[in-house]
Image: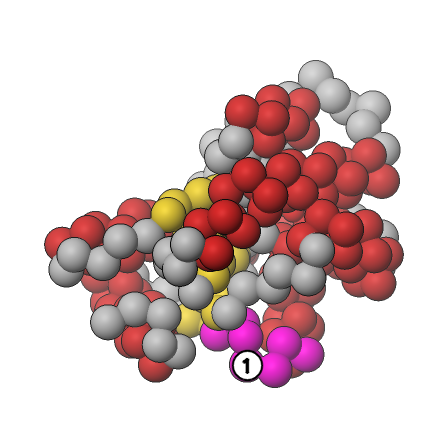
Amino acid sequence: MFVTFEGCEGVGKSTQVRLVREYLERTGQAAVYVREPGSTKISEQIRDVIANPENTEMSDITEAMLFAASRAQLVREVIRPALERGELVICDRYIDSSVAYQGYARGMGVEKIKQINAPAIDGLLPDVTIFLDLRPSESWRTLKNSDRMEQESADFHDRVYEGYIAEIATSNGRIVPIKPDFDKKVTCERILEALREKGAIK
Ligand code: TYD
């Protein structure tokens, strides 16, 4: 099974991925953990180019293609081989991030982003996507503003959120919205319940 996590910045996504991982390790359920962009040597090099705040001149299409290139490498080097071995793969962000950030927030359009990503994912969509459903302006964290994406405006990040909400409606139940609770353990329980229901974990 292929599970991905999605959400806006500062909603506690990385914490939840870690808590789910701790639960799976505690209960003896093996999985492969990756994050986007990154998780292969080449994808990490691409990540550095994307995140570098000095790259102010980066065009939208370049950015979208760099995310897709990082994804293409990760799918071929790690995700697909692990799935073929019958392993559970948990990925922090995947194509829905490109749809929300580049498609909606950057205004490039969903169709264009899906076209760019088609050869990258080569038909591989997640079996289940956990979406941490919190509007960035309602999140209780403040951004570090340390990388190029985090430096975007509050409006940009709200458009990311709207993009995710629009995608949920057309995902045929693949994207499961989960309301984060102030108590991160409660949030984690909600996620585990959703993953059990989908048969991804025990
Ligand atoms: P990261 O530090 O991993 O952020 P987070 O902890 O929020 O996941 O940086 C990834 C950044 O790249 C984040 O701002 C989301 C953005 N992004 C896209 O714009 N498009 C994409 O396809 C992906 C995978 C990420």
Residue 163, position as x, y percentages in the image: 68, 64
Q: Which stretch is magenta?
A: 170-176
Closer to us: 117 or 97: 117
- The rendered magenta stretch, by its main secondary structure, is classed as loop
Query: As drawn, is 17 to the left or to the right of 4?
Result: left
Query: As drawn, is 103 to the left or to the right of 196?
Result: right
Question: Quadrant for ligand 1?
Answer: top right
- Picture quadrant where residue 193 is located: bottom left
Compared to residue 131, the image places residue 122 above or below, namely: above
**Mark 1 element type:** loop
Residue receiving disc 1: 173
Question: Count of labels shown?
Answer: 1
Closer to us: 38 or 146: 38
- Picture quadrant where residue 16 is located: bottom left
Which residue is drawn at the image coordinates 35% and 76% (left, top)?
A: 199
Residue 170, position as x, y percentages in the image: 68, 79
Name which residue type carries label 1. Answer: Gly
Residue 31, position as x, y percentages in the image: 32, 52
Query: As drawn, is 197 to the left or to the right of 162?
Result: left
Closer to us: 15 or 74: 74
Which residue is drawn at the image coordinates 19% and 52% (left, top)?
A: 25
Residue 88 in view (yes/no): yes
Which residue is drawn at the image coordinates 22% and 58% (left, top)?
A: 29
Q: Is residue 21 magenta?
A: no
Query: Within 10 Å of the Cα at label 1, are there few (<14), some (14-19), or many (20+) other Cα atoms?
Result: few
Which residue is drawn at the image coordinates 50% and 42% (left, top)?
A: 78
Residue 105, position as x, y percentages in the image: 74, 53
